Image (cartoon, helix red, strand yellow):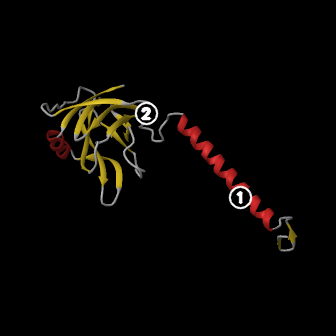
Amino acid sequence: MLAVKGLNLGFEGSTMKTTLATLFFSFFLLAATAFAQNASTGTAVASGCGTVDIKFDVKTDRSRHHAAQPEPGKAVIYFVEDDTQFQSRPLPVTRIGLDGTWVGANHGNSYFYLTVDPGEHHLCANWQSFVGVGAHHQSAAAHFTAEAGRSYYFTVKNTWLREVMIMKIALEPLDSDEGQLLASRFAFSSSRAK
């Protein structure tokens, strides 16, 4: 019998193992059930992301390079997808979320822009489909505060390094000059929800 400082707990060797195994299995089952319930809601964890059920068809056009000036009382935000470090095919379709709603997508080295109201905004970038085994970082998030009359650039860096099997996505602010330069090299992206 197992005794702790003279206290008899009533567990014998095999009973103790059975009890611990049952507790471990119960904990695992409870955790798996909670995860499944959270995943089935379709809500992403980051506040900028939309629901998992929204998918996009994306078309890119290298012949035109669109640019926008902010409308009065608004700001413009550019999303530039950089796949130069993605060493696999096909390249991912990357959804972009703004304040909990998917607003568009990029594919390959491409960009799009939209206008936003001034104030704080939450952003999300997410690979819309399976990219590869071991791709643990399939989403990235950021936030920023928009000011009327300004333009903002964010890069979505998709990385897949074959030699070391690193697959990740990053969403980072860009200097406006660097953002304009990348956008001028990349295709303009237009997307629509399926």
Q: Which image quadrant is residue 187 in?
A: top left
Q: Within 10 angstroms of label 2, few (less than 14), some, or many (20 or more) residues?
A: many
Q: Position of residue 113 (x, y in %)?
A: 25, 32
Q: Which quarter of the figure is the N terminus placed in?
A: bottom right
Q: Which residue is mark 1?
A: 21
Residue 14 can be seen, yes or no: yes
Q: Position of residue 158 (x, y in %)?
A: 30, 47
Q: Within 10 angstroms of label 1, few (less than 14), some, or many (20 or more) residues?
A: few
Q: CA distance from mark 1 to mark 2?
A: 39 Å
Q: Specify whether 116 is left or right of 19.
A: left
Which of pointers 1 and 2 lies earlier in the amino acid sequence?
A: 1
Residue 150 can be seen, yes or no: no
Secondary structure at badge 2 equals: loop
Q: Amino acid at mark 1?
A: Ala
Q: Residue at x 26, y 51 (%)?
A: 87
Q: Amino acid at mark 2?
A: Gly
Q: Residue at x 15, y 34 (%)?
A: 62
| Residue projecting furthest to the bottom | 5
| Label of residue 190 in the image | none
Q: Which residue is mark 2?
A: 50
Q: Which image quadrant is residue 115 in?
A: top left
Is 145 above or below relative to 13?
A: above
Q: Which image quadrant is residue 140 in?
A: top left
Q: Residue at x 41, y 34 (%)?
A: 99
Q: Position of residue 192 (x, y in %)?
A: 32, 25
